[in-house]
Amino acid sequence: MTKIDSSQAQERFAEIITSVGDRGERVVIEQEGKAIAAIISYADLKHFQALENDRDAEMLRRAMEKHDGEFVTIEEVIEGYNNLHGTDLTIENIIND
């Protein structure tokens, strides 16, 4: 992985894109010594997105197992809150506030 200052990245953008695209290099862009962004290949991006989707699916599966596959809707949560606190909230109230 290559690290490069943001000002150099601007000057060498075409070269960086070629390195990333042709060789799969990963480039970290820094400002004042702090990493602020990265340039990765499209293949890497798709790989990371797939990993993220797998993680999300695994978290959902675990949650469903923990709760025997039963979930409540947001409307049920709001109704329970209203009953508990004597309020009259709606989804629209919450979204628009």
Image (cartoon, grey):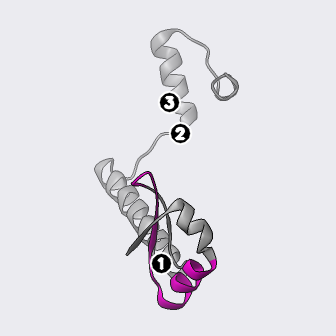
What kind of residue is marked 3? Val
What kind of residue is marked 2? Thr
Mark 1, Cα crowd under 10 Å, few <14 / some 14-19 / many 20+, is some
Q: Pinpoint residue 40: horizontal percent, then vertical percent.
A: 50, 74
| In the displayed structure image, the side of residue 48 where residue 74 appears, left or right | right
* Disc 1/disc 3 C-alpha distance (Å): 39 Å
- Relative to 7, does residue 17 appear above or below in the rendering? below
According to the picture, the residue beneath numbered tag 1 turns out to be 44
* Disc 1/disc 2 C-alpha distance (Å): 36 Å
**Which-is-in-front pick, marks 1 and 2?**
1
**Which-is-in-front pick, marks 1 and 3?**
1
Assign the C terminus to one quadrant of the image. top right
Mark 3, Cα crowd under 10 Å, few <14 / some 14-19 / many 20+, is few
Mark 2 lies on a secondary structure that is: loop
Assign the N terminus to one quadrant of the image. bottom left
What kind of residue is marked 1? Asp
Q: Pinpoint residue 21: horizontal percent, then vertical percent.
A: 56, 85
List the single residue furthest toward the left: 66
Please tell me whether residue 17 belongs to the stretch shown in magenta. Answer: yes
According to the picture, the residue beneath numbered tag 2 turns out to be 73
Please tell me whether residue 43 belongs to the stretch shown in magenta. Answer: no
Q: Residue at x 44, y 65 (%)?
A: 52
| In the displayed structure image, the side of residue 75 where residue 59 appears, left or right | left
Q: Residue at x 55, y 78 (%)?
A: 16
Mark 3 lies on a secondary structure that is: helix
Q: How many marks?
A: 3
Q: What are the residue bounds of the magenta stretch?
A: 14-34
The label shown at residue 77 is 3
Mark 2, Cα crowd under 10 Å, few <14 / some 14-19 / many 20+, is few
Q: Residue at x 54, y 26 (%)?
A: 78
